[in-house]
């Protein structure tokens, strides 16, 4: 975490790559790229993670993995007291005997909701059997389908309303994005898909369940449906909204279409029977923004901007 704080303070992608890989690196490096595009240096916000649990299964081949759970807290004396204590689940991976351990997944959630990892003999966590792994490997596609259903019908399915509003690790609400855009006279789609290179990781939980983590890709598309109602893309003041630096991936201007691309890490709990799952936590962000410029009509454009969708 000390190295992480140095990398964040310097926006140092090389230092970041020394301890992160996979979607963890892609997401965090995108924030560095956005800050650099905006010529913005975020105020220092050092933090640490108090380790609560760790699980390492007995493994005989690389890549090797272990998972660590902890509670985040700020090291800045001037930081306001957090209204909610947030936790994190860190998956570390080592590609070979000569490689360093790197964080590859880092979903967040309320500290009080950290799942309890199973323990086994000899200090090792019990391994997840092959049948359960096959079920776990199919979960990313099931989550994609559940998000599509929520977007197109408004039915929550396996989700709960709090899954979309959790200040620590909530997920985007596709249905809300669609209805908000339509109310402003636009067309919106939140398109999720499984990762091209699956990174599904599964660890046993106390009580018989399974913690499953993986990365989804997404593309949010906002379309102007009338030439008199175009998208006015603007850049907020980062001194007031430092988390909006991703908007600088796209130049300010008037557009007929804007698309955000990004990644969403998901943590879900598979039931002991393997027949159902529930959302646990997430970590995501925008990694690029593109758009099609348009010539404004005589009518003034309507200001509208896609929401980053992550708390």
Image (spheres, rainbow, N blue to C red):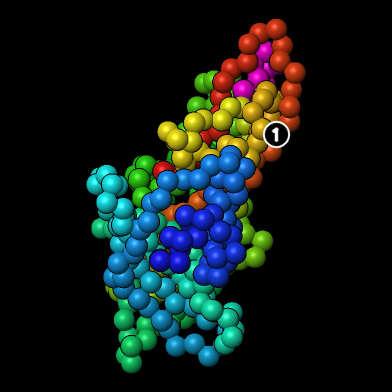
Residue at 43%, 83% in the rendered image: 57
Q: What secondary structure characterizes most of the magenta part? A: loop
Q: Is residue 82 visible?
A: no
Residue at 65%, 65% in the rendered image: 197
Task: Look at the picture and state if 247 lies above or below 276.
Answer: above
Task: Look at the picture and state if 65 lies above or below 281.
Answer: below
Quadrant including the N terminus: bottom left
296 left or right, relative to 185: right
Front-most of 1 and 175? 1
Give the magenta range.
Answer: 224-232
Quadrant including the C terminus: top left
Instruction: Give residue 188's quadrant in the image.
Output: top right
Q: Which residue is mark 1?
A: 291
The picture places residue 109, in percent across and down from the top left corner, at 36, 55
Front-most of 20 and 176? 20
The picture places residue 148, in percent across and down from the top left corner, at 55, 44
């Amino acid at each position: 975490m000390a190295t992480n704080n140095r990398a964040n303070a310097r926006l140092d992608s090389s230092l970041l790559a020394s301890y992160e890989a996979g979607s963890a690196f892609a997401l965090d490096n995108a924030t560095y790229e956005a800050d650099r595009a905006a010529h913005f240096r975020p105020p220092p916000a050092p933090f640490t993670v108090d380790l609560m649990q760790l699980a390492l299964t007995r493994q005989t081949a690389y890549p090797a993995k272990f998972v660590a759970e902890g509670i985040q807290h700020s090291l800045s004396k001037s930081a306001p007291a957090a209204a909610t204590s947030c936790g994190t689940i860190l998956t570390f991976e080592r590609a070979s005997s000569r490689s360093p351990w790197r964080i590859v997944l880092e979903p967040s959630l309320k500290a009080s909701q950290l799942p309890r990892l199973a323990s086994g003999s000899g200090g090792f966590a019990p391994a997840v059997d092959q049948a359960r792994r096959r079920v776990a490997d199919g979960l990313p596609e099931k989550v994609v389908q559940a998000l599509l259903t929520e977007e197109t019908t408004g039915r929550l399915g396996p989700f709960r309303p709090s899954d979309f509003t959790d200040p620590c690790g909530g997920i985007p609400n596709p249905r809300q994005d669609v209805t908000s855009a339509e109310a402003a006279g636009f067309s919106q789609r939140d398109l999720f898909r499984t990762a091209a290179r699956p990174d599904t990781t599964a660890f046993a939980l106390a009580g018989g369940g399974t913690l499953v983590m993986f990365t989804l890709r997404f593309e949010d598309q906002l379309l102007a449906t009338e030439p008199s109602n175009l998208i006015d893309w603007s850049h907020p003041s980062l001194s007031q909204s430092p988390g909006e630096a991703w908007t600088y991936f796209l130049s300010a201007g008037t557009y007929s279409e804007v698309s955000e691309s990004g990644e969403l890490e998901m943590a879900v709990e598979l039931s002991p029977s393997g027949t159902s799952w529930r959302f646990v936590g997430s970590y995501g962000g925008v990694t690029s923004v593109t758009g099609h410029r348009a010539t404004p009509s005589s009518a003034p454009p309507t200001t509208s901007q896609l929401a980053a969708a992550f708390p």
